[in-house]
Image (spheres, rainbow, N blue to C red):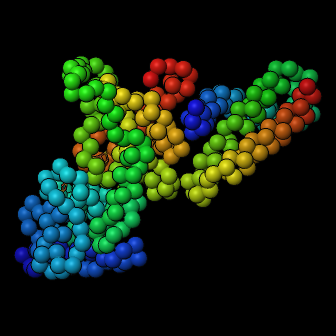
Amino acid sequence: MPLPAILFLAQRASALVLAPLVLIHLGLAIYAIHGGLTAAEILSRTQGSLGWSLFYGLFVAAAAVHAPIGLRNVLREWLGWKGVGVNVVLAAFGVLLLLLGFRAVSALTGV
Amino acid sequence: MSDTENTLQVRVWRGGEDGKFQAFAVPRREHQTVLDVVTYIQRELDPTLAYRFACRVGMCGSCGMTVNGRPRWTCRTHVDTATGGSDVLELEPLRSLPVIRDLATDMTPFFEKWQKAQGRATGTRSRADDTHRVDPASPRRQAADAAIECINCGVCYAACDVVASDPDYLGPAALNRAWTLVNDDREGDRKGVLAAATAGGGCHSCHSHGSCTEHCPVELNPSAGVAGLKRLSLLAMVGGKV
Ligand code: SF4
Ligand code: SF4
Ligand code: FES
């Protein structure tokens, strides 16, 4: 299986997952601000919630797949950076997103 | 009419990549094509002007140039269309190809990519065999027919921004050819063609912005062919039959 085809599929599939999650996330943010919820009130609702852990866990995983692939295209086309180097750096970037994201999710939900 | 109304101000690219424009005044004529203008300059004003053409009727695909910023076949483009009614014509070689001199580009990379996309037929029968029967109404043959009349002019290649920014990208014309082959029942190596068209620099580099389709002078739709290849490559990946 050629790498470009795999990346193409992974980027589309992760976009499919991300689209509804982003909309719900934005809706939540607007709701929280309009409702005047404090950080403490938000945390009291998310701490220990398996549902929110799964929701944002999936969000993080999809973003960690989606973002590096897009960035790889930008670097290849705009800076002409190709070969193994760009793949290694962006794979590392994906792992970093995953780690930082999961850390944030666990801080939010405590799960 | 005064003289200026009967005269076209033509700026022509002279030299190689680092050349510059040279101005010529060319008499306006009715139904004048851009190629007529170039030919007039070469015959009447400066015989050293380098450019390429052959058929003059939109068959051979050798007369592509950048006309007022837009890639075009020059033998079938009227001056009025290209200038939009003004009297200024600016002629440059096609973009994204090495310039040999003046308006003539080196088409070698274009045709090399054609080969890299495996844009050539692989036969399965010999002359001893019966003719391969193809149903003209079958969806695959119709898809191939819709894309087959390419004249290799390189206009879509010059129009494509991904070609301009990514020297590895095979480009719309080569991939359009690959698309006709994967839809051709007579093709002996459809898997090979699809693999070549899907590898690095292949169909997945395309941004689907359709500049190729917008500029193709014979109104083909290479963008749709490239999208078709993407679809087939995904099908092949999940184990579908190609
Ligand atoms: S649709 Fe694809 S091939 Fe056509 S001009 Fe755009 S990027 Fe190039
Ligand atoms: S697809 Fe159209 S623009 Fe491109 S090379 Fe063929 S005829 Fe020319
Ligand atoms: S000279 Fe042949 S297509 Fe224009």
User: Could one spot residue B56 in this view of the protein?
Assistant: yes
Whole-percent x and y of residue B99? 36, 68
**Relative to residue B86, is residue B62 depicted above or below?**
above
Q: Position of residue B204 (x, y in %)?
A: 51, 40
Q: Quadrant location of the C terminus of chain A?
A: top right
Q: For residue B147, what is the image quadrant? A: top left
- Residue at the image position 28 percent from the left and 26 percent from the top: B125
Decide which of A19, B187 is in the foreground and name it.
B187
Residue B20, position in %: x, y? 35, 78
Which residue is found at the position 82% from the left and 20% from the top?
Answer: A51
The answer to whether residue A43 is left or right of residue B15 is right
Residue A79's x, y, as percent? 60, 59
What residue is rendered at 66% in x and 27% in y? Answer: A17
Q: Is residue A41 visible?
A: no
Horizontal arrangement in the rendering, residue B68 relative to residue A97 (left or right) = left
| Residue pictured at 63% horizontal, 32% vertical | A10
As displayed, is residue B204 above or below residue B161? above
**Is B136 on the left-hand or right-hand side of B114?**
left
Q: Nearer the viewer, residue A110 or B194?
A: B194
Vertical arrangement, residue B15 with respect to residue B126, above or below: below
Rendering quarter of residue A105: top right
Total labels: the figure holds 0
Residue located farthest toward the front when viewing the structure as drawn? B128
* The N terminus of chain A, quarter of image: top right
